[in-house]
Image (cartoon, rainbow, N blue to C red):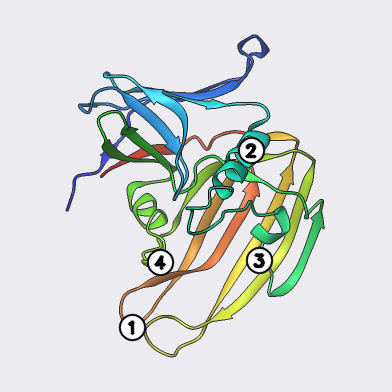
Amino acid sequence: MKNTVLLLLTLTIFTSQSRGQESISGSIDGWTHGVGEVYTGVFTLTEVGSIDDSGNFEIALKPGYLAEVKQKMEAENSNPDKKFTSQLMTLGESCQCAQGNLELVNGDQELTTMAVLGFMLANMEKKEKFGRLVPASNRDFAEGYIKLGAYENQVGYAVDWYYVDKPGVAKGECSVDSYPVNGDEMYTRNTTYNLDLKPGWNLVKYEISEIFTDEGGKTYPVKESIASISKLPSDMQFVFLPE
């Protein structure tokens, strides 16, 4: 198994208006990969920061980020050689509610997030991908969180930054009955939404507090929550997962 490095860092969010932007900064202890960039995204990467040869990183939280993402997406979608098109989700689309009650305010507005499955660290000039940097409660949660479709969920949390242009609210209790990949024992996935988003950047915490394990050992969220938070949790770590 590849070694996973946990950061020993001091994390600061700068909000000074004289800087013209907010930023997230920290340092990866024992960094040996050299200089590079910080990217967000899954299929299409967008450069949002940098890391130096000592492991000090800074990630920009620019004002007007949603419009920038939309402009880039529209330009990419207009490429006739592109095999698929991308689009932003709305607040309402991001809050699934098969059963239950969900209060939505401005749920039709588009949103974007910063730490989609963590940040990618790389040096694109040298075509080197170093790995992912995940703001999370611990290593085990971070490893399961970034593996889409692997069903390796763990109890814990991750933090992300949401950007909206208008105030938005999503509050309520929702559930959906599901079958696991292995076996026929149904389980119910319960999700609590407590989002109160302001125009601009918003801190959001996604947490799994209970999981269901199927006959093959795959794990699924049973109790989860997505909530606005006013500051980073004191026990949050930036977990570096090497490529």
Report whether residue 99 is seen. Answer: yes
User: What residue sits right under mark 2 in the picture?
Assistant: 71
Q: Seen in the image, is 149 located left or right of residue 20?
A: left
- Residue 161: x and y, percent? 58, 39
CB within 8 Å, label 3 to label 2:
no
Q: Amino acid under label 4?
A: Gly
Mark 4 or mark 2: name the one nearer the start of the chain: 2
Mark 3 or mark 1: name the one nearer the start of the chain: 3
Badge 2 element:
helix
User: What residue sits right under mark 3 in the picture?
Assistant: 96
User: What residue sits right under mark 1 in the picture?
Assistant: 215
Mark 3 or mark 2: name the one nearer the start of the chain: 2
Badge 1 element:
loop
Mark 3 or mark 4: name the one nearer the start of the chain: 3
Up-down: is 184 above or below 35? Answer: below
Q: Quadrant of the C terminus?
A: top left
Badge 3 element:
loop
Marks 3 and 4 sit apart, C-alpha to C-alpha, by 17 Å
Marks 3 and 2 sit apart, C-alpha to C-alpha, by 27 Å
Up-down: is 153 above or below 140? Answer: below
- Residue 146: x and y, percent? 40, 53
Circle nearer the viewer, 3 or 2: 2
Mark 4 or mark 1: name the one nearer the start of the chain: 4
- Residue 141: x and y, percent? 39, 53
Marks 3 and 1 sit apart, C-alpha to C-alpha, by 26 Å
Q: Seen in the image, is 65 located left or right of residue 83?
A: right
Q: Amino acid under label 1?
A: Glu
- Residue 239: x and y, percent? 35, 40
User: Tag on residue 149?
Assistant: 4
CB within 8 Å, label 4 to label 2:
no
Marks 4 and 1 sit apart, C-alpha to C-alpha, by 17 Å
Residue that appears at 45% across and 88% down: 185
